[in-house]
Image (cartoon, grey):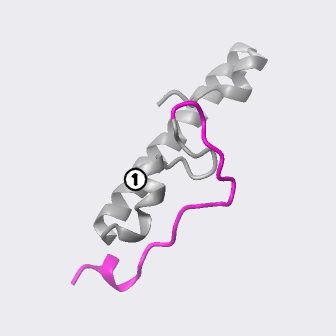
Amino acid sequence: MEQLEIFPLQSPCIGVCEVNNKGYCKGCLRSREERFNWQKMSPTEQQEVMRLCRNRKARVLAARRKAQEAGDPDQLTQSGWDF
């Protein structure tokens, strides 16, 4: 038995629930399909979604850092959302 089956993953939702122009939640960075099907997913599938969200967050943070270094205030508010 996998440890994931013993300790179910909690939803990564943080209550923001607003989507960007690509359909990703601005709070948890999940796609619509990932949000709607979370309860139906196996623990392994949930773990994969969590991995994808971590990667998306890393890209958002990197884009924000790059915009900050470039001194582009417009990019700071919207950077990183084009996955």
Which residue is rendered at x = 65% and y = 52% of the image?
17
The secondary structure that most of the magenta stretch takes on is loop
Which of the 4 quarters of the picture holds residue 5?
Answer: bottom left
- Residue position for label 1: 51
**Where the N terminus falls, by quadrant?**
bottom left
Image coordinates for residue 44, horizontal then vertical, percent = 29, 66
Q: Is residue 3 above or below residue 24?
A: below
Which residue is rendered at x = 57% and y = 35% of the image?
60
Left or right of residue 67: residue 12: left
Identity of the amino acid at label 1? Arg
The magenta-colored residue range is 1-22
Which residue is rendered at x = 67% and y = 20% of the image?
67
Which of the 4 quarters of the picture holds residue 46?
Answer: bottom left
Residue 35, magenta (yes or no): no
Residue at the far left in the pictured view = 1
Given residues 82 and 38, the one toward you in this image is 38
Looking at the rendered structure, the secondary structure element under dot 1 is helix
Q: Is residue 68 above or below residue 27?
A: above
Image coordinates for residue 13, horizontal then vertical, percent = 59, 61
Which of the 4 quarters of the picture holds residue 38?
Answer: bottom left
Image coordinates for residue 11, horizontal then vertical, percent = 52, 67
Crowdedness of circle 1 by 10 Å Cα count: few (<14), some, many (20+)? few
Left or right of residue 33: residue 43: left
